[in-house]
Image: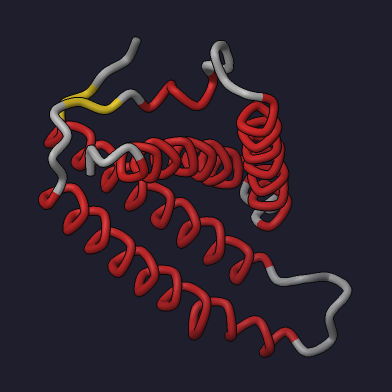
Amino acid sequence: MLSLGKKKFIILTIAVLIFNCVMFTLGGMAAFRAGDGGVENQAALILIPAFLVPAAWVVTAVLAALILIVGLAAKMSAIDPAEIFKMSGLGVFAKIFRAGYLAFALFLMLFGFLLLTPEWLSAGLYALSGGALLVLLFSLVRAAARGEA
């Protein structure tokens, strides 16, 4: 069991969130610098740094604020991020939901990796940190549903 205290969980979740955004920024800027061989209008690539990167940072700031607010208002003393992988003792619907959530998270990780493939390292780190973030957010929602948050 990987139980984290409330403060450690909040710090870890926000750190993973910021790391995910940094990897998106690095990968997006690498795609901007590399250009696209099949596109005649390379100037259209200015949309990546002009719109997508600032939008990612705004979403990151809003999500970090929400995690901080929920975390500070939480009544929980400890939370287990690995809970999503424990299927024993669950009903059929709960097992199907968790398996579906994990499958969807893997799909999003693959999509995130393919989105930033010109920069392989940042694409891989973006995908892995995004998957970790989805697991952490599931843990926070589960704690809130049990009345611990």
Residue placed most toward the observer, 129 or 135: 135
Residue placed most toward the observer, 49 or 18: 18
Residue 79: percent from left, percent from top = 27, 28
Q: Compared with residue 50, is residue 104 higher up or lower down, i.e. above or below?
A: above
Q: Compared with residue 145, is residue 49 higher up or lower down, i.e. above or below?
A: below
Residue shown at 59% from the left, 39% from the top? 124
Residue shown at 63% from the left, 64% from the top? 31
Residue shown at 23% from the left, 38% from the top? 148
Q: Is 23 positioned to the left or the right of 69 in the image?
A: right
Q: Is 126 positioned to the left or the right of 13 in the image?
A: right
Classify the position of the N terminus by image quarter. top left
Q: Quadrant of residue 33?
A: bottom right
The image shows a total of numbered marks equal to 0
Q: Quadrant of residue 36?
A: bottom right
Residue 136: percent from left, percent from top = 39, 38
Classify the position of the C terminus by image quarter. top left
Residue found farthest to the right: 38
Residue placed most toward the observer, 125 or 31: 125
Q: Is 34 positioned to the left or the right of 50 in the image?
A: right
Colour pattern of the rendering: secondary structure
Residue 2: percent from left, percent from top = 32, 15
Q: Compared with residue 43, is residue 63 higher up or lower down, i.e. above or below?
A: above
Residue 70: percent from left, percent from top = 21, 54
Residue placed most toward the observer, 57 or 65: 65
Q: Quadrant of residue 46?
A: bottom right
Residue shown at 54% from the left, 36% from the top? 128
